[in-house]
Image (tube, rainbow, N blue to C red):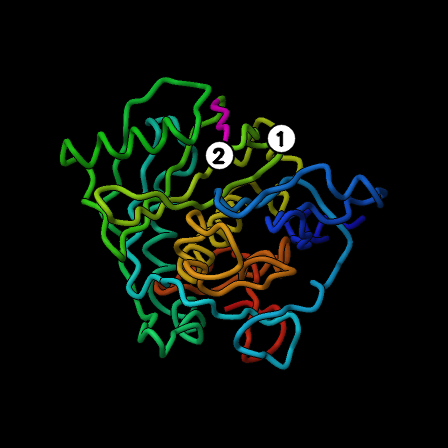
Amino acid sequence: MKRTALFTSLSVATFSLGVVVLSAGCVAGQEGTDQQSSAQSLGHEHMMLVGHQATAKPEQASGPTGAANPNNLAYYGGPVIQHVNVVPVFWNANVAYKNYLEAFYSGITTGPVMSFLSQYSTTSPAQTIGNGTRGTPYTDNQTSTNVTDAAVQARLNALFTAGKLPAPNNNNLYMVHFPPGVSVTNSQGQASCSVFCAYHGTYKRNNQDVYYGIMPDQGSGGCQNGCGSSSIIARNTTEVASHEFAEAVTDAAVGLATTISAPLAWYNSAGGEIGDLCNGVLGYAKLGDGNTYAVQQLWSNKVGACVTP
């Protein structure tokens, strides 16, 4: 299997008792029951899973838009982030590539990626995806090395209350990056770099959706062996971050969805989100700051294929 093969986070939808379960695709050399080894369900964070698989296409999608291409994303009525303001949150000062990530988030929020994502603007309700901003980065001082999703949410809430982070709104996206040696466990008890490379999620605070991403260190703990398509960890870090960024913008409230309906936004019922359909397909894009970064290709409904924005 080539290093550029797709990751197992390309999702195949299976239906049981009315609950949609997104399961890992076929890992190299494994078929049949092994396909169910790592599952994620709606109503939880949306993960990018660790591992590689052969090139695959999602099954026929069934969505209200009636898209001609069965691989296209359908719109289910939920929110997109119209003018994303990415706030990088570093668990502590030991996060790798901090300055590089700050520059990356400045670049990705304007220019070709946002122009590409504008095709996922909506008319009912009227939502227009346009250029965004990078907010002021915040470096925390946390020392915990085994972190749960609930603990991350609690820490974000504490930082909101203390005025260390801007309060949640419909545009703020908090990308939480962790240093080497920190393991993150999601709400389903699954571990970073063992099951997932990263994820994005949603929770409610004072009736306001909070959009956030969880970014484990991509160069350690197992992520270095199954996350990203480059041999250079800095490139893998921005590739994975671009996957979660684009999915958060186009399917912001996925963490609150329990069925294939609103608050899902752009979604393929067989293949998942905009990044899942192109998982592990590496591209290089000149972003809004004029610099070129490693990114993951994303699905284009206009083109009907994976493209580099």
User: In the image, what residue occupies the spot 31% across and 76% down?
Assistant: 126
Residue 243 appears at what percent x and percent y? 51, 54
Residue at the outermost left position: 163
Front residue of this view, candidates 9 and 143: 9
Residue 78 appears at what percent x and percent y? 39, 63
Whether residue 183 is in magenta: the answer is yes
Q: Is residue 155 left or right of residue 235?
A: left
Magenta span covers which residues? 182-186
Residue 55 appears at what percent x and percent y? 75, 58
> Of helix, strand and loop, which mostly describes the magenta segment?
strand
Vertical placement of residue 179 versus 244, above or below: above
Residue type at mark 1 is Ser
Q: Is residue 234 left or right of residue 282?
A: left
Local SS, label 1: loop
Q: Residues within 10 Å of mark 1 (few under 14, many from 20)?
A: some
Whether residue 173 is in magenta: the answer is no
Closer to the camera: disc 1 or disc 2?
A: 1
User: In the image, what residue occupies the spot 39% across and 18% down?
Assistant: 144
Residue at the outermost front position: 17
User: In the image, what residue occupies the spot 25% across and 41% down?
Assistant: 205
Which residue has dot 2 on it? 216
